[in-house]
Amino acid sequence: MIKKYLDAFLHLWYPHICLQCGTDQLDNNSPLCLPCANALPLTDFCSMPNNTIEKIFWGRITIQHASAALFFTKESIVQKLIFELKYKHNKKAGLFLGRIMGTALKNSNNYTSISLLIPIPISRNKLRKRGYNQAQILCEGICQVWNKKIATNILLKKQNSDSQTHKDRLERAGQDAFQFYLKDAQMLEDENVLIIDDVITTGATLEAACNCLEKANPNSINIACAAYTL
Ligand SMILES: [Zn+2]
């Protein structure tokens, strides 16, 4: 009862409203109301063999399965959610996106062997500035609906290796190969790893991460992103 009054009181000062439409009729754990959540552009890539995301990596790296849960377009709800996660410290948005990913992965036959989630790491500098790794929040959201182990200290990013956005793909792929390193690589032996990232565009960063993970000889490497840029 006290919690109910406290929630109502807090709502007056800090109203919890839907990111998209502004209604206050929504679940406390969700950044979106139900109608807005139901309108999200799901891809169904998880269950689709040879999907768009897998094709990005054809001829570049050997992966078992790859997917992205949502389509990312400019000025869309998905862009808003990603922005909230990356730049607004909105953990709720990240956990919500993670749960969408987790539900899609759990319902697919292609990811049943997955034993370990690996969030794409960010550099220590960025971690200090932002306070958290957004891919790790996605992993935590995934685990709320699909219980898996998360490995946060095996794949690591070197210092001063961010801000590659303006370089073209080939240049990036070449440079990115040296951006990651492994710690306790033997932990990946026999694991079916699933790399988690927020948005996939060219796949250069993920390609570099896979090249690095391959050195640890895991049983398989898979990729899951929150959104795919059209
Ligand atoms: Zn809404």
Image: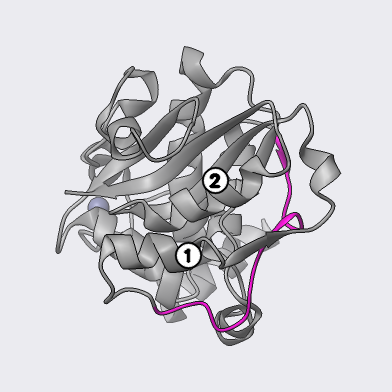
Q: Amino acid at mark 2?
A: Cys
Residue for badge 1: 176
Residue 40, picture quadrant: top left
Spatial CA span between label 1 and label 2: 11 Å
Q: Is residue 24 visible?
A: yes
Query: Residue at position x 37%, y 75% from top?
Result: 164
Residue for badge 2: 210
Horizontal side of 202 relative to 141 (left or right) equals left
Horizontal side of 213 relative to 224 (left or right) equals right
Q: Position of residue 170 (x, y in %)?
A: 31, 60
Query: Residue at position x 61%, y 57% from top?
Result: 136
Residue numbers of the magenta segment: 148-163
Asked if the magenta segment contains residue 161, the reply would be: yes
Chief SS of the magenta region: loop
- Total number of numbered labels? 2
Farthest top residue in view: 109
Q: Earlier in the sequence, mark 1 or mark 2?
A: 1
Q: Is residue 123 above or below residue 47?
A: below
Asked if the magenta segment contains residue 66, the reply would be: no
Q: Give the colour scheme of this rendering.
A: one colour
Q: Which of 61/126 is in front?
A: 61
Q: Secondary structure at mark 2?
A: helix
Q: Which of 122/190 is in front?
A: 190
Q: Secondary structure at mark 1?
A: helix
